[in-house]
């Protein structure tokens, strides 16, 4: 039986304050993509983080969306 599809979303943008996770303007939050594994999402996250290194307020995040869709689904090996 094939493994259940996992869903990792990568999003980012400018934060109001680097000490908090609140975006300056939600309308400008960038959806980088949806990825089937943490490894692929991490590669996309790292590329965006490196591309925006000169902007101190820019932050990108990996969201484990499969856990939001099915909270009973817990994959500790994904971390």
Image (spheres, rainbow, N blue to C red):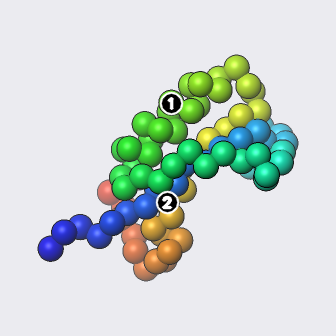
Secondary structure of the residue carrying numbered label 1: helix
Image: 70 above or below 25: below
Q: Residues within 10 Å of mark 1 (few under 14, many from 20)?
A: few
73 vs 33, nearest the viewer: 33
Q: Which mark is residue 64?
A: 2
User: Marks 1 and 2, how far apart in space?
Assistant: 18 Å
Q: Report x, y in % for residue 53.
A: 65, 23
Which of the image's four quarters has the N terminus?
bottom left
| Mark 1, residue position | 47
Secondary structure of the residue carrying numbered label 2: strand
Q: Report x, y in % for residue 43.
A: 43, 36
Q: Which mark is residue 12?
A: none
Would you say 12 lies left or right of 70 here? right
Q: Residues within 10 Å of mark 2 (few under 14, many from 20)?
A: some
Look at 84% across and 45% down and name the residue there: 24
Look at 29% across and 70% down and name the residue there: 4
Tag 1 near tag 2, CB within 8 Å:
no
Q: Nearer the viewer, mark 1 or mark 2?
A: 1
The answer to which quarter of the image holds residue 14 is top right
Look at 83% across and 48% down and name the residue there: 25
Q: Report x, y in % for residue 62.
A: 53, 50
28 vs 50, nearest the viewer: 28
Would you say 37 lies left or right of 13 here? left
Which of marks 2 and 1 precedes in the sequence? Answer: 1
């Amino acid at each position: 039986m094939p493994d259940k599809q996992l869903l990792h979303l990568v999003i980012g943008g400018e934060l109001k304050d680097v000490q908090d996770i609140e975006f300056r303007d939600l309308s400008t939050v960038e959806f980088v993509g949806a990825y089937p594994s943490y490894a692929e999402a991490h590669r996309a996250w790292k590329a965006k983080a490196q591309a925006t290194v000169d902007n101190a307020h820019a932050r990108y995040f990996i969201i484990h969306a499969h856990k939001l869709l099915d909270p009973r689904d817990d994959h500790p090996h994904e971390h």
